[in-house]
Image (spheres, coloured by chain):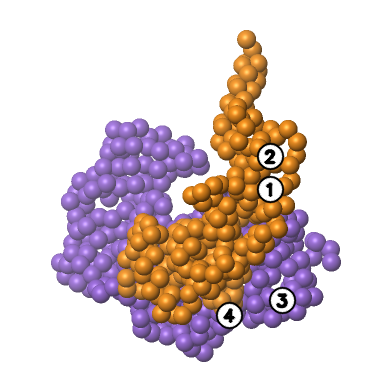
Chain colours: A orange, B purple
Amino acid sequence: MSRMRRRLIRTWALTVAAWLFVLAVSFPLIWMLASSFKSPTEITAVPPRLLPDALYLGNYEALFAGDFWRWFMNSIIVASGTVVIVIVLGTLGAYSLTRFSYPGQKATSTAILFTYLFPSVLMLVPLFLIIVELRIMNTYWALILADMTFAMPFSLWLLRSYFLSVPLQVEEAAMVDGASRFACFFQIVLPQVMPGIISTGIFAFILAWDDYLFASVFTTTAEMKTLPVGIARYANELNAEWGILMAASVSVTVPVLVLFAFLQRRLLPDLNAGAVKA
Amino acid sequence: MPAEHAPSFGRSNGSELRLDRLVKRFSRGEPAVQIDELRIRAGEFVTLVGPSGCGKTTTMRMIAGLEDPSEGEIYFGGKPVVDLSVQRRNVAMVFQNYALYPHMRVSENLEYGLKKRGVPRAEREVRVLAVARMLRIDGMLDRRPRQLSGGEQQRVALGRAIIRTPEVLLLDEPLSNLDAKLRTFMRAELVKLQRQVGCTTVFVTHDQLEAMTMSDRIAVMRSGRIQQFDTPQDIYNHPANLFVAGFIGSPPMNFIAGTAEGGGGGCTFRAQGLQLHVSDADCGGRLRPGDGRQVTLGIRPEHVGLDGGSGDLAAVVSVVELIGAEKYVFLESEAGELIARTNADARLQPGDRLFCRFQRGKIRMFDSTTERACVEPLA
Ligand SMILES: Nc1ncnc2c1ncn2[C@@H]1O[C@H](COP(=O)(O)OP(=O)(O)OP(=O)(O)O)[C@@H](O)[C@H]1O
Ligand SMILES: [Mg+2]
């Protein structure tokens, strides 16, 4: 067998294996999507079938007729607010951690990583007390504060490693060129850590978007519910409206997928290459 | 604008650079840099050389304003600048690893400094083009740094520095990342460029060939202190101390430790296997008198003549290296090991017994305890 042919077969085998793997991983998602278009009777049919007989839109109609858009907006506001605050505080914090030297700087970096190891449930009570004290119970601020607290340690750590990859000398060159520290930060450093900022933003967004625990505790009224809390009411101990639940799940997942698809292109080009000659 | 005309984008009037009792301490103990005085004339090309860790980069960073001196003052054309921030000093610096802005195109890299200084767009464009032509990077203005070769990146870094026609231009080993051929080429280019732009230039290098060929004057540093500041020729011919004598020149100067009797007009140098009368004329200056003191005789390899019959010092050839047009002959003698430089067709074999003859007028004498030259150059 010629080498060319062997290589071709290898490529094909690998491709098939990769696709099988993708299929296995995405099966629950496919099931979710298919089920959201099934009528209640078909969903519980035995034996189960993957594809619906007819495209049934009733689940979506029921979902959108309810409070869905209200919850959706709440989730968007909370997640976006979290992203903005995490990015602003995170970049400033990471810049400080990597560029200035002050007593306890190393300890701070390590302590930050440690706080990430605490499960969110542990922070529930302290956060609750703080939120009550600040009188922001049942507001967006309460959720943003809670999500931010949870997202911040990892974000700082992530951004820190991106900032570390920007050579100090590039900044010094800019300062010799006449750039102030602020100009340096915005014009020289930020563009180079952009992939890191986008990654951090996605991380914080998903964290806030998926949050059930904080949203269920820190909101008390129906109109403050976020998507995860809102759609949970379609499944209670008495019965589960599987069709609507699946439709809701699809509606929650799609915005995140769109966000990813949109930002992925910006994540790929590596702007850092070639800053300094190795 | 035809490319063959040297495009002018402005000329710096370069100002005198003076370091006055400049000290930098990073921690307690010996300072990293301690310079009593260094006065560099306007428009001069001065090279700092010295072994690794001797404080060259630290000195440059203090001049640029990236590092605050612990003590002392720096003057640009008479005005003190230590209290001026890095942004407000009119200096430019080329870093060893170039430190280009990776996210900007070459043209943006070049014009960034002008932009920060409020130069209007039209003038910026003219200057970018002029500098790019001068450095022959005008074909790659739209590329990003990572799309350039090392030599091209180096020229962009240089362009970014000179485009502002700074008073003082600092170059920290800018050629060390280039291959040997490009280095030789850039050496000449850099000198030509500096003459054209006219800014006072401080250049750091490890390579003494670069130092010798490019500079108006060389400052040799060791452990943060300047050992000698002089023209390349004077540094080579009249090293102020043993360190400079050994550091400048390749292969290095031969040293023979011994004693000197007499002085003032001439002395008798004695070492193991060697007795030599050294007159003032023999050592190219006026010997300081000193009876029976410990001295070190220095003689450069090219001033050691080899003779089969007679000479100053008997020696045995141990190794012969052919370096293109010449040969380095490693010798063993009672007075220690020596290196001689001869022409390539000299017929020599390891094991040959012969005599070294030290060229009169080229012998240098150093005090072994103070390590200083004990010869005053004749005016
Ligand atoms: N930021 C710093 N903190 C502490 N010590 C430093 C710092 N920068 C430099 N030093 C010390 O100061 C001395 C001089 O360093 P410098 O970088 O100026 O040497 P150099 O002559 O440029 O060496 P090289 O030829 O290797 O570049 C060294 O001993 C170095 O360890
Ligand atoms: Mg250095």
Question: Which quadrant holds the C terminus of chain B?
Answer: bottom left
Of circles 1 and 3, which is in front? 1
The residue positioned 30% from the left and 63% from the top of the image is B242
Asked whether the beta carbons under mark 1 and mark 3 sit within 8 Å of each other, the answer is: no
For disc 3, the marked residue is: B10
Residue A254 location, x and y as percent? 66, 50
Q: Nearer the viewer, residue B300 or A78?
A: A78
1 and 2 marks on the same chain: yes
Q: Quadrant of residue A228?
A: bottom right
Give the left or right position of residue A174, taking residue B237 as reference: right
Q: Nearer the viewer, residue B177 or A117?
A: A117
Q: CA distance from mark 1 to mark 2?
A: 8 Å
Q: Quadrant of residue A79?
A: bottom right
Asked whether the beta carbons under mark 4 and mark 2 sit within 8 Å of each other, the answer is: no
- Identify which amino acid the numbered label 4 is placed on: Asn
The residue positioned 50% from the left and 85% from the top of the image is B84
Query: Which chain does the residue under circle 2 lie in?
Result: A
- Mark 2 neighbour density, 10 Å: few (under 14) some (14–19) many (20 or more): many
For disc 1, the marked residue is: A59
SS at badge 4: loop
For disc 2, the marked residue is: A38
3 and 2 marks on the same chain: no
